[in-house]
Image (cartoon, helix red, strand yellow):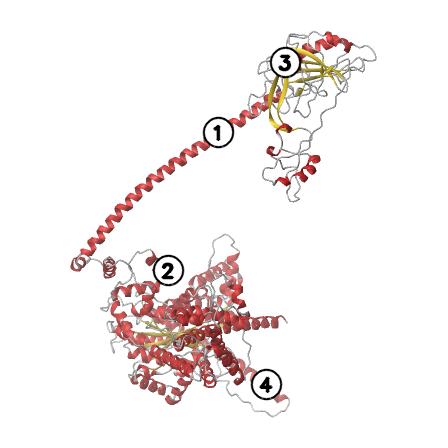
Amino acid sequence: MGIDDISRSEWEVLIRRDGKPFTRSERVCSIHFNESNIIKFDEFVINGEVKRLPREHFKLKPGAKPEIFPDYPPYYKPKPKKRKSPKKRNSSTTPAIQVRAEGNDREEAILEREIENPLENVLVLVDEETGIQPVNIPPIVAGEIEIKPNIPAIPPAPEATWFDEIDTLILPNGNWTKCDVIRKEKKKVFVHISEENGIQIDKTVVFPALMNQNCEPKIVLRGTCCYEGDLVKKTVYNLKEAQDLLEAVHKIKLCGGTGILENPYSKNCDGAAKSLKMIRCDPCHKERKKLRRMEKKEEMIKEKLEQKRKQKNNSIRNLKTSQYKLQEKIKRYRKKIADAMEACRKTKKEVLDKAIKSLPEAQQEAVRSIFDASHRKGPRGRRYTIEWVYECMLMRIKSPVLYAHIRKHKILVIPSETTIKRYLKNYTGTYGFQASLFEMLCQKGKEMSPQKKRGVILIDEMKLTAGTYFDLEALKVGGFVDFGAGDLSAFGDEKVEAYEAAVGQLPGGDPQETAERRQQRNSMKKGTRGEHLGDHALVVMFQPFQGAWVQNLACFLTKGAASEDELTKIVLEAIILLENSGFLVDGVVTDGATWNRSMWTRFGVSESNPSSVHPCDSNPDRRLFFFSDYPHLLKCMRNCLASKKIIHTQEGDVKLDHWDAVVEADELRLYGNREAPRLTKEHIHPDAWSKMRCNLAWQFWSTSTAAAMECYRYQMEDGTGTSKLADSEASSKLCRLVDRLSDCMNSRTPVAALRPNSEMIKTIDEFLNWMKETQDYLTNKMHEAKLKAEKARVAFLAKRNKRFRCAQSNILKERDWVFSESTDVGLKVTLENTKSLLQYLCSDKPNLGYKYLMTSRLNQDALERFFGLMRQSCGGNTHPEARMFVQLFRLLSVYSLVKPLKGSNITGGDMLKTLMSLDDLRNMTNNERKKEFDKRLDEIIDGGDHYEPGHIEDVVARLEDHDYFKESIDEFALVYVSGFAARRSARFTEGCSDCEEALTLKEKDSATDEHLLIKLKTRGYLLFPSNELVNTLRYIEHQILKACYENDLEENFLFLVLDNLEKSSAKVAMPLVGCPLHREQLTKYIMKFYLVLRMHFACRRWNERTKELKKKQRRHRKEAHLT
C-alpha cells in the first residue's frame, strides 16, 4: 500500500529498517495493518438493505498505521493506540440526511430530500463540485440512510428566483430522479438511472444556486464526461428553458464507445453521439478505426509469425529427417568401411600387387601404405618404405601447410614431421661446401648422360639482416662470417692436390700462401661489436646445358660482398668438387659487380683474353669461359645512356632525347592508340628501384620503340611529327640491333636456340663490330680533342718564352668507352665466349653430342628465382635472417638432390638411402663439440670441495671474496628464471622425492622477498625455487656476466663461459642441487639448460642493441642531410 509524505516519516519510526528512508515507489504490505483499518468494500443502504461493492484497490482509513510485524521480536512491535469513543451530541430540530460513501477519495456528497417518483426510496451520490457520479457506485436508497441531526439546514435565499420552483420540473420518464446537494452552496441535481448493464447513473444535470436569473448547468454523461456539445444550451434563463434542457439531455443518445474492451472510450470522448442514427462520437469513431487497423496489423503480424513458425517447424522436421537419414547412411558406410578394412587385412600381398600393377609407382606406394595402416590400430608402430618416405619428404619440402592438412584430415597415410626431420637432419644446414652433397651428386650422376652433366656455375649475393643466434646442434653462436670448414682434406687428398695445382696456375698464385689464408679466413679478431656479423649470402649454383634442373652447391655468409680472393678460391673449390663428382664445368656466370670483374682478373680474363685455362683439365682445347649476366648488361646499357644523355657513333648520335620525344608524342594522344604504348618516363629516367628492373630495360631497347621513332620521323617529313626525331636514325638502328641481340642471348627453346653458322651468330658479330667501330671512333675523336688542346697549350707557353717539354705521354694510349668500362668489357667477353663455347660444344673434335646451345643457360635467371623464393618463404621482410636463410637453403638443396631426373634408372628411394648413409663432416664436428661440452661440465662439477646445502651461503660469500669482478645481478629475475628451471628439471629427477624437494621450497619454508616477482605474476601455477637452486644459478650467472664484460659475443662464447666456470670452480666448488646420489647428474642438466637459455637471451639482446644502433645511425644520416 502506498503512503503519502505525512505518513512516511511516521512509518519510518514504526518499521525498523536500519534508518533506511521510504521512497514514493515503495509499498507496505496489507498484512502489517489491522483489518479494521483497511477499506476493501464500498457499502450502500438500499431499501433498508446494506449493499457491499468490492474495491479494485484497497484503501486505508485516515490515521491508519502499520502495527502487525510477525517476524519482529515482541519488544520491537509498536503498541497500537486505542481510539476514543465519539462524544454525544444533541440532535437538531430539523434533521438533515447525510450519506457518506465509505472508501472514495473525492466523492463525498450530502443528499437531501426524499424522492417523489416510482424510485422514491432511491438517493443518488454525486460529486458536489463536478456533478460526476463515482464509478461503480450504485444509487442509495433513502430508507436506509443514516440521519445526522448535527448538519444545519441551508439558510433561505435572500430573494425569490425561478430556482426555487425548479422542483416543479417534469421529469422526462420514471428513470429520472432529483435531489439536493448541500455543502458550500445549494445545488439541484437531476439524475437518470439506467438498468441496462446493472443499476448505474448515465446522465446527470446539475443546476447550481442562482446568484441572478441566468444559470449554467453542468451536464455529465456516463458519470465521467462533462458534455459541452451543441445539442443543449449552455445557459438557462428561466424555468421553461430548464425544462427544455432536461428534455434535451434526455433525448441525447449516449456514445457507444469504441466497442473494444481494452480501450472502451477515447480520451477525447464527450459522452454523446451527434445524432440518433449514429452509434458513437467522432473521437471514439476515429479511435475505433485506429484500434481496428492496429488489430488487423497485429493479426497480419501474427499470421506472418505463424507462417514463419510453421516454416521453421517444417524445416526443423526436414532437418531432423535428413539428419536421421544421414546418420543411417553413416552407419551403413562405417559398416562398409569396417568390412573393407577387414577384407584388406585378409588380402595377401601378392593379390594386392597384382591389383595395383597398372598404377604409377607413386600411387602404388600410397596404396601399399594405406593397406599396411589398416593392419594397425593407431598411428604408432607404422612402417614406411623408403620410396614412400621419399615422396612424403618432397611433399613436405614443397608445401608444409599442405602436408599438415593431409596428415590432419587423414587423406593419406604419411609419416609425421618428426620422422621427416630425422631424414633431413643428416644433411645439415650450414655454410660452406658439404661432402654429403657431392656424394649425392656423384650417386645421381651415375645414371645421367654426359650431355646432362655439363654446365656452368652461377655466383651471386643476396642481402641478409645481420643478427646472431645460438645453434643448439653445433653449440656455438651463429650469424658471424662463415666460409665453411676451409679444409679440403675431408673431401680427399686428390682434391687438395688438384686445388693447389689450380691455384698455382693462376697469375701470381701461391699454393702455400693460399692454404694459410684459407685457414685464417674464419678467424675472429676482437673489435667493435657487430664488426664481423654476416649481412650477405653468397650462393653457388650449378646449371646444366640440358635438363630442367639446377643444384645449389653451397652458400657462404659474408660481411658485405666477398673479396676477389675469396671468390677465386670458392670458384676453384666448386669446380674441383664438381669435376671429381662426375660433372663438367665449362663456364662461370657472374654479374657486373666490381669484385666479380676483379675475380676475372685473377683468372687472367680480359678483353683480349676472354677465357682461362681449365683448372681440372690439361687439354689445351678445353677452356674455362666467363660470362656476365646478359639481363644485367642490358640494364647497364640503358643506365649508361640515361646518365650520359648522348653516345657519339660513326652513324650519328644516340640521344636520350629521342626516347623522350616518343613518349611526349604518345602522351598527346590521351585516349587514342599509341605507337609505343609500353614506353613511359620510368623507362627513360629510372629511379633507384627501376634501374634494377630487367623488363623496363628490355622494353627500352625493343623493336617497338625503334618502330615508333621511325614512324614519328616519317610523320615529321609530312609535317605532322616532332622535329626532335629528325636525327634519330642512329638511335632506331641501335634499338633494333640490341633487340636482335637480346633474342640471341636469351633463347629458351630448341627452335630459337643458338646454332653454328646461323643468323644469330651474324647478329653477335654485327654488334661486336658496331662496338669496335664506335669505340675506335670515340677514341680517335677524344685523341684529336686532346691533341688540339695540347697544341693550344704549347702555343700559349711559347708566347710567354717559357721553357717547356711537350710530353705526349699516354695521349695515344687513352681511349673512350661506348657505355662504361665494365659494361663494354662484359659485353665483349660474354659475346666472344658464347661463340667460343658454341663452337667447342658443337665441334666434331671432340664430339660432345651437342647440336645447339640455349643461351638462357648462360644467365642468372635460375639464381634470381631462387632468391625470390627465399624472400617469399622468409615472410614479409625482404631481407631474411642468416639462420632462416640457411634452413631454407638446406630444404631446397635436399629437394633437388633426392629428386631423380626424368628418364633416369635411379629411383628417389635410392637417392634417399644414399643421403641417410652419409656421415657429413659437420655432423662429426658437432658430435665432437658436444662431447667436449659434456666433459668440461663434468670437470666443473667435480672441481673443488663441495658444501652441504645448509652451508651454501658460505660458498657464495667465499666466491665474492675471491672474485674482483663486481656486477649486480637482478635477484628478482634470477629467482623467476630459477622457478622455470625447477619446472623443466623436475622430469629428470628419476622419481627421487629428495631431488624434487630440493628444487622447490618446502611447505614449512615461506617465500622471501626475493620471490616477489613470482608472487606478482603467479596465478597459482608458478613454482617457488629452493635456495639451493637459486644459489647454483647465481653462481653460473656471475660467470656469464663476467664473460660478457670481458669478451665480445663470438662463435665460441659458450666455451668462454665454461673457462670462467673452470677457473672459479678451482677456487670455490660450484653448489650442487639434489640428493647425494643424483646431485651430480641433476646439477649437470640444470647447467646445460641454464647455459643454453642464457645464450639465447644474449643473442636476442645483441640483436636488439644492433637494431637500435642502426636506427640511430639512420637518424643521424637524415639529420646530416637536413643540415
Q: Is residue 885 visible?
A: no
Dot 2, how many residues are within 10 Å of its Cα: few (below 14), some (14-19), or many (20+)?
Answer: few
The amino acid type, in three-letter code, at marker 4 is Arg
Q: Which is more foreground, mark 1 or mark 2?
A: 1
Q: If you read the primary sequence from the N terminus, does the residue marked by circle 4 or circle 1 appear first?
A: 1
Per the image, the residue denoted by label 4 is: 793
The amino acid type, in three-letter code, at marker 2 is Val
Q: Which is more foreground, mark 4 or mark 3?
A: 3
Cα–Cα gap, marks 3 and 2: 101 Å
Cα–Cα gap, marks 4 and 1: 111 Å
Compare residues 1048 and 868 and report the one nearer the observer. Answer: 1048
Percent x, y of residue 382 = 26, 62
Residue drawn at the location 28% of the way across and 44% of the way down:
329
Per the image, the residue denoted by label 3 is: 48
Which image quarter: residue 53? Answer: top right
Q: Which is more foreground, mark 3 or mark 2?
A: 3
Above or below, 868 relative to 218: below
Cα–Cα gap, marks 1 and 2: 55 Å
Cα–Cα gap, marks 2 and 4: 76 Å
Per the image, the residue denoted by label 1 is: 300
Per the image, the residue denoted by label 2 is: 401
